Image: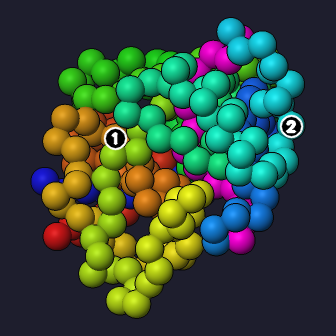
Amino acid sequence: MHHFRIRQDRSSGYTGRIDAVHKWGLPGILNCPACKATWSGGAKVYPSVDLSPVLALADFEEARAEPIEEYERLCALVRPLLPPGAILQPGAGLGPLAGNAQGRFGSFAFPDAWWPLVQREALEKLEAQGLRGLKGCRTELRFRQRNSPEFLELEILPLGRTHPDCLPPHRDPPCSRCHRFGIPLPDDLLLDARTLPNDRDLFRLEDFSGVIVCTERFVDACRRLGLEGVMFLPVPSK
């Protein structure tokens, strides 16, 4: 099976802009006691999660870094509310994407490179094509125009990994405490075929969660339907 990396198509001529963040989020980690790093990811996002049952919502509303003990305490509050297969990391976004939007949009929009949005009508067409693992979540976007589109955020679970052959041969393992994987994204990405799911057509990588991968079935459906605002780059696997 062939796989492709999903990216925003900046050549499509659409002028739409979205300034938004997720309603809640986990803090980053401040000076991990094991690796000493202060860091935050943010590519792993779960827009379907409703934190309303959590009493101390204010703990999830401000972007900041915290000691790892506080981060782990907040993870424990969130974990029962996550969708199956979700993996938490510092800076993970939770709940609907909220903010402002304006301009002309294609079928897909990217307020951030790893947060793909899709118009409801386009998602329904993709689902009618029999694509697997698509989940659209509501957004709270305020449009400064009439006839505004209805965008849903795709909730994309982390499932596949890169192949060791595209990583530095001499590399440190992930941190034993905070699990930071301090390796930059390889220029020549290679997927580990043994880790790729065979029951869904859209997923993000576990180790480089800013990379969103789709199957050839997904690409063919988007092209057949004439969906715009997204481009596909072939990614080899081994």
Q: Which residue is mark 1?
A: 202
Q: Residue 62: which numbered mark, if any?
A: 2
Q: Quadrant of residue 198?
A: top left
Check disc 2 and report its element: helix, strand or loop. loop
- Looking at the rendered structure, the number of numbered marks drawn on it comes to 2
Point out the frontmost of discs 2 and 1.
2
Amino acid type at circle 2 is Glu
Which one is in front, 170 or 22?
Answer: 170
- The answer to whether residue 90 of the structure is visible from this angle is yes
129 on left or right of 20: left
At 16% across and 58% down in the image, what residue appears? 194
Question: Which quadrant of the rendered structure holds the N terminus?
Answer: bottom left
How far apart, in angstroms, are the residues tagged by discs 2 and 1?
30 Å
Q: Quadrant of residue 231?
A: bottom left
Q: Residue 221: within the magenta? A: no
Residue 122 percent coordinates (x, y): 44, 25
- Up-down relation of residue 9 to residue 202 (above or below): below
180 on left or right of 70: left
Amino acid type at circle 1 is Leu
